[in-house]
Amino acid sequence: MQTVLPKIHYIYNFCNDLKAIREFYSECIGLQECFYEPKYGCISYQLQGLEFMFWETDEDLKKPSGFAWQPGGGGGELQVVSWTMVVSEENYPDVVSKLLKMNLKMVKGKPQWLQNSYWAFVVNDPAGNTVEVCTYPSRKPDSTEWV
């Protein structure tokens, strides 16, 4: 008998500004929407079998006061949920440029070269979640200072 392992199918997040969330994840990061319906206050992204959803609420959401700790060294001190979004190497400069234009709260003002293996730009999304936006280059860059 084959064992079927459980899997997470949906992750539900909440926000106070669905349009800002859409700008961040759809327009800046480049995630493909599988469902967007402002009248229901919902946006959803299909991520390799996982549906990542945001629901808009009028309730006063308590945003984290800083950044989540992350094992790669690019985050902060808070012990709260966070995630990493991996972007293709060729799209990464454009994504970083778009994120900078959003005037988000960020750990550093530009991507950092971490663990001698990847670029990471840690920001708070419009709902206050810590998101590490990273890319794994095909080769180590000549300079580890983002320009």
Image: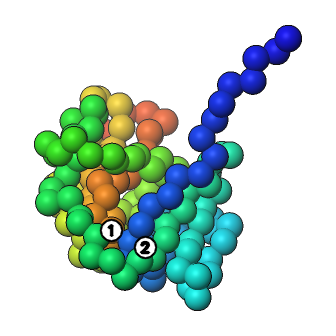
Q: Amino acid at mark 2?
A: Ile
Q: Quadrant of the C terminus?
A: bottom left
- State if disc 1 and disc 2 touch (CB < 8 Å): yes
Residue reaching furthest to the top:
1
Quarter of the rendering occupied by the N terminus: top right
Q: Quadrant of residue 114?
A: top left
Q: Position of residue 70 (x, y in %)?
A: 26, 38
What colouring style does the render use?
Answer: rainbow
Q: Residue at x 76, y 17 (%)?
A: 3
Question: Is 114 located above or below residue 121 in the figure?
Answer: above
| Apparent side of residue 73 relative to residue 99 in the rendered image (left or right) | left
Residue 21 numbered tag: 2
Q: Alpha-carbon distance for marks 2 and 1?
A: 7 Å
Which mark is drawn over residue 119?
none
Task: Please state if 95 lies on the left or on the right of 125 as rendered.
Answer: right
Q: Judge left or right: residue 108 versus residue 123.
A: left
Question: Residue 84: x percent and y percent?
Answer: 40, 46
Q: Secondary structure at mark 2?
A: helix
Estimate the x, y position of residue 72 in percent, counting from the top left.
28, 33
Residue 28 visible:
no
Q: Residue at x 47, y 47 (%)?
A: 86
Q: Evaluate whether residue 133 shows in this view.
A: yes
Mark 1 neighbour class, 10 Å CA radius: few under 14, some 14 to 19, many 20 or more: many
Under mark 1, the amino acid is Ala
Q: Is residue 64 above or below residue 16?
A: above
- Closer-to-camera residue (136/10): 10
Closer-to-camera residue (25/77)? 77
Q: Residues within 10 Å of mark 2 (few under 14, many from 20)?
A: many
Residue position marked by numbered label 1 in the rendering: 127
Q: Earlier in the sequence, mark 2 or mark 1?
A: 2
